[in-house]
Image: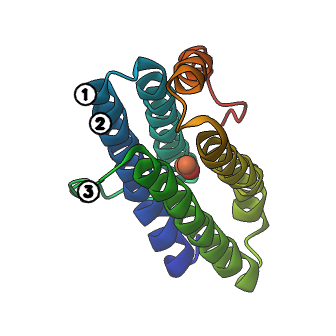
């Protein structure tokens, strides 16, 4: 039987991941309106990945014969005054999600729930990658964002990002 706190945190994470998808869809929407389709694509792919994350938590609970309770997804509430604000909000959000994954991991560790820890290992690694990606984007924007030609090329680079299904299969 799964520990109640671990169960509750895993269930809440479904909502958090769907919110992440919603947030990145909002970022994509922002860049679409700006005419930066490459940035819009990059965040669209990110939104798809977040949806996958939500489904992995959902599937894990179902595989473990645990109840799933779906909650309302909050409205994306960030406002931006410039492109860099969006990128920084993305990094801040990923750092927050990392803290959530760490909290679940700590709760599972406390009750020796090794199966949940093993499941979460993939997310620990994934969060490292997502924070690196968000940081890289900020660095590139700092370097090239103020020059229109360089921004155009960065936009082209981000247009090349394609969605791939998660490597974790449950
Ligand atoms: Fe689901 Fe961006 O972490």
User: Residue most toward the bottom?
Assistant: 110
Residue 41 appearing in the image: yes
Name above or below for residue 35 compared with residue 59. Answer: above
For the point 78% across and 57% down, the residue is 118
Q: Which residue bears the numbered disc 3?
A: 79
Is the residue at mark 1 in contact range of ligand 1, meaning its CB lies under 8 Å from it? no
Is any part of residue 65 visible from this angle? no
Quarter of the image where one finds residue 56: top right
Compared across the picture, whether 131 is left or right of 6 comes to right
Q: Estimate the spatial distance between the alpha carbons at disc 1 and disc 2, rounded to whole Å.
A: 5 Å
Q: Residue at x 36, y 32 (%)?
A: 28
Q: Give the mark nearer the N terminus: 1 vs 3.
A: 1
Mark 1 to mark 3 CA distance (whole Å):
14 Å
Number of labelled discs?
Answer: 3
Name the element at disc 1: helix
The residue beneath circle 2 is 30
In the rendered view, does 34 fall on the left or right side of 91?
left
- Picture coordinates of residue 170 (x, y %)? 66, 37
Quadrant the N terminus occupies: bottom right
Query: Could you tell which of marks 2 and 3 lies nearer the N-terminus?
Result: 2
State how far apart marks 2 and 3 are (Cα): 10 Å
Where, by quadrant of the figure, is residue 71 drawn?
A: bottom left
Q: As drawn, is 7 to the left or to the right of 143? A: left
Question: Label 2's element?
Answer: helix
Residue carrying label 1: 33
Work out whether 154 lies above or below 50: above
Measured from the top left, where is residue 43 in percent x and y? Answer: 46, 33
Residue 100, position as x, y percentages in the image: 56, 70
Cβ(mark 3) to ligand 1 < 8 Å? Answer: no
Mark 1 packing: few (<14 Cα in 10 Å), some, or many (20+)?
A: few
- In this view, 98 is above or below 130: below
* Contact between labelled residues 2 and 1, with CB atoms less than 8 Å apart: yes
């Amino acid at each position: 039987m799964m520990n109640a706190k671990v169960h509750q945190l895993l269930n809440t994470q479904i909502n958090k991941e769907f919110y992440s998808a919603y947030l990145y869809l909002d970022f994509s929407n922002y860049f679409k309106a700006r005419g930066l389709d490459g940035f819009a694509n990059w965040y669209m792919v990110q939104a798809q990945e977040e949806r996958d994350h939500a489904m992995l938590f959902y599937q894990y609970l179902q595989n473990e014969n645990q109840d799933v309770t779906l909650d309302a997804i909050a409205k994306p509430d960030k406002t931006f005054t410039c492109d860099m604000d969006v990128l920084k909000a993305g990094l801040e959000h990923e750092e927050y999600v990392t803290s959530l994954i760490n909290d679940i991991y700590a709760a599972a560790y406390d009750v020796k729930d090794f199966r949940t820890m093993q499941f979460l290992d993939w997310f620990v690694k994934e969060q490292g990658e997502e924070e690196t990606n968000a940081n890289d984007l900020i660095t590139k924007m700092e370097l090239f964002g103020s020059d229109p030609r360089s921004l155009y090329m960065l936009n082209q680079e981000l247009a090349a990002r394609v969605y791939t299904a998660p490597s974790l299969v449950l």
